[in-house]
Image (cartoon, rainbow, N blue to C red):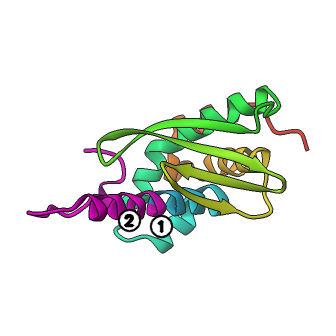
Amino acid sequence: MGFFNFFQRKKRTAATSQNADGNNAAVAKSVLNFISLGLTNGAELLAATYKPSSKVTEFVNVSLKILEALKRGYEHKFATNFVLISMKVNNQSKEIELTQLGRDVMLSLGNSTTIISSITLIELYANLRNDMIKHPEIYGKERQLTATSYPDPNW
């Protein structure tokens, strides 16, 4: 199964290019909002917000990839002000970009964007790392150990 199957498009017999583009944008926006909620508020809030509960599993499945990208950025002091994360969305390879814009972070997927206000890439790294450490019952013991082995962000 592909990542974010919840957001898959319904099959249509006759689709126009405009409808497909609009649907792709809606899927991208949903994915970005989902990821931003997980990064800022953790898996517990995702479980309370998204039904079925398998949505949390989808976030957990990509969380390590996100954490690894943020860790690489952190180790290079976010010199480029962005990180790229490659993942599958509706069984297609996509890149999600997290870009530092002043005191905000912009998430981009295709032509869709969402802004997380008043947070930095370092804080997103810390949030996800700490969420993994605090909630092995959600992320699993292996991800907890991995997160613990990653550098603690210096404020």
Write the residue at 91% across / 44% down. Answer: 155
Label 1 sits on what residue type?
Ala
Of the numbered discs 1 and 2, the one sitting upstream in the chain is 1
Q: Can you give x and y, in whole percent of width and height, for residue 51 in the image?
A: 37, 71
Q: Can you give x and y, in whole percent of width and height, for residue 145 in the image?
A: 61, 34
| 74 vs 48, nearest the viewer | 74
Label 2 sits on what residue type?
Ser
Q: Quarter of the image for the N terminus: give it.
A: top left
Is residue 133 left or right of 12 when viewed as pictured?
right
Which residue is under mark 1?
A: 47
Helix, strand, or loop for circle 2?
loop
Is residue 7 left or right of 119 when viewed as pictured?
left
Write the residue at 79% across / 26% down. Answer: 76
Looking at the rendering, the stretch of residues picked out in magenta corresponds to 1-30
| Badge number at residue 53 | 2
Q: Can you give x and y, in whole percent of width and height, for residue 96 in the image?
A: 53, 44
Helix, strand, or loop for circle 1?
helix
Image quadrant where residue 55 sits: bottom left
